[in-house]
Image: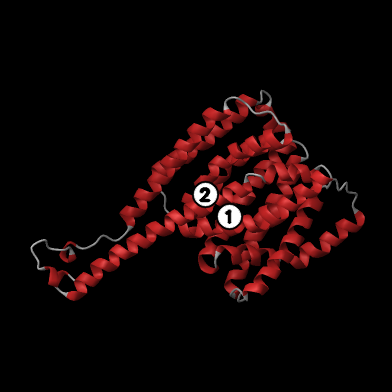
Amino acid sequence: MKINDNSSRFSAIADNGRRKSSAHAGVLLGGLGVLAFSFSLPANKLAVAGIDAVGVTVWRAALAGLLALAYLRIVGAQRPALHDLAALLCSGLGVVVGFPLFSSLALERIDSATGAVILGLLPAMTATFAALLGGERLPWLFWAATGAGVLVLCAFLVSTSPDALSGFALSWGHLWMVLATVSAGFGYAVGGTQAKRIGGAQSISWSLVLLLPISVPLCALTAATGSFSLTGPVVIGMFYITVISQFLGFFAWYGGLARGGIARVGQIQQVQPLLTIAWSALLLGEHLDRWIYLVGVVLGLLVWIAQRARFREAARAAPPVPASVAPDVNEPVSLRR
């Protein structure tokens, strides 16, 4: 047996081990990001009680952008390549401008629990944009589980609110939340792709910094001309969506998307609506429907099915170890080394 054959065999085993380790790390980081984001809508609901939607959007973008600029200077980050700037800006338009603005407009009209259920469409949006923009090929079972999750969430929304179906046609609150979900899905897909190139922390940081020439002047303008009620809960809500939702939460989330795959790790976000509904009930006193527990079990199962299908597809796509380099049990130990 040739020494190079042994080297190839062990190299393939090591590569498979690294892929599995990276995938598990991606799921863990993605879970931490989801936990951080699950508080976002209740915190945003607190913020819009004293600050209008435009003010919330530009304030969180400007303040988080300044934090990002300080972070990049501290770590001595290199400037992104010119061909990365457009993608980083597009990601920022999705997660720094689109989602905060549309979700704030929605939360001025609907409660955060209802917004959370609509946000359950986000994993499907993220996977769809990832497939369209990032070239991720996903098995049919993945899409079946994702579609089933969307249907469960929509059925939950309709069942818990008798007027929900007509509300989708008439209520601007629901429409704004749908647009927020589409914006976030697009931003996550593009930002997750950039995170593979430059890291999750730098991806969101550069997106925020690139928007500073716009967000800082608008922040100053709204602060000078707007009318605000900065009560304790409003300040707490604003602090959370600025520091955690818009900045630190993305460190874990984009890191998870980069390591575990945008579409697969994005499926973890199907449990975020249930967490948000729970926080809305505990922190804001919003109604917690008894069906939420059943929905939680069903969504958890669908997330597992989707991820299992993706794992199997990735395993089949991985290059197999050639039979010619497999160890021979009759070969002397000294030759197997």
**CA distance separating discs 1 and 2:** 9 Å
Q: Residue at x 66, y 44 (%)?
A: 39
Disc number at residue 266? Answer: 2
Along the viewing direction, whichever of 147 and 28 lies nearer the viewer: 28
Q: Is residue 211 above or below residue 267?
A: below
The residue beneath circle 1 is 188
In screen coordinates, is 18 left or right of 65?
Answer: left
In screen coordinates, is 129 left or right of 313?
Answer: right
Along the viewing direction, whichever of 165 and 290 lies nearer the viewer: 290
The answer to whether mark 1 and mark 2 are in CB contact below 8 A is yes
Q: Is residue 259 above or below residue 104?
A: below
Q: Amino acid at mark 2?
A: Gly
Along the viewing direction, whichever of 237 and 89 lies nearer the viewer: 237
Quarter of the figure with the C terminus: bottom left
Residue 87 visible within the image = no
Q: Estimate the x, y position of residue 113 in percent, counting from the top left.
A: 67, 35
Q: Is residue 78 above or below residue 140?
A: below
Residue 92 visible within the image = yes
Q: Earlier in the sequence, mark 1 or mark 2?
A: 1
**Callout 2 environment at 10 Å: few (<14), some (14 to 19), or many (20+)?**
many
Q: Residue at x 64, y 51 (%)?
A: 183
Q: Estimate the x, y position of residue 209 in percent, counting from the top left.
A: 70, 67
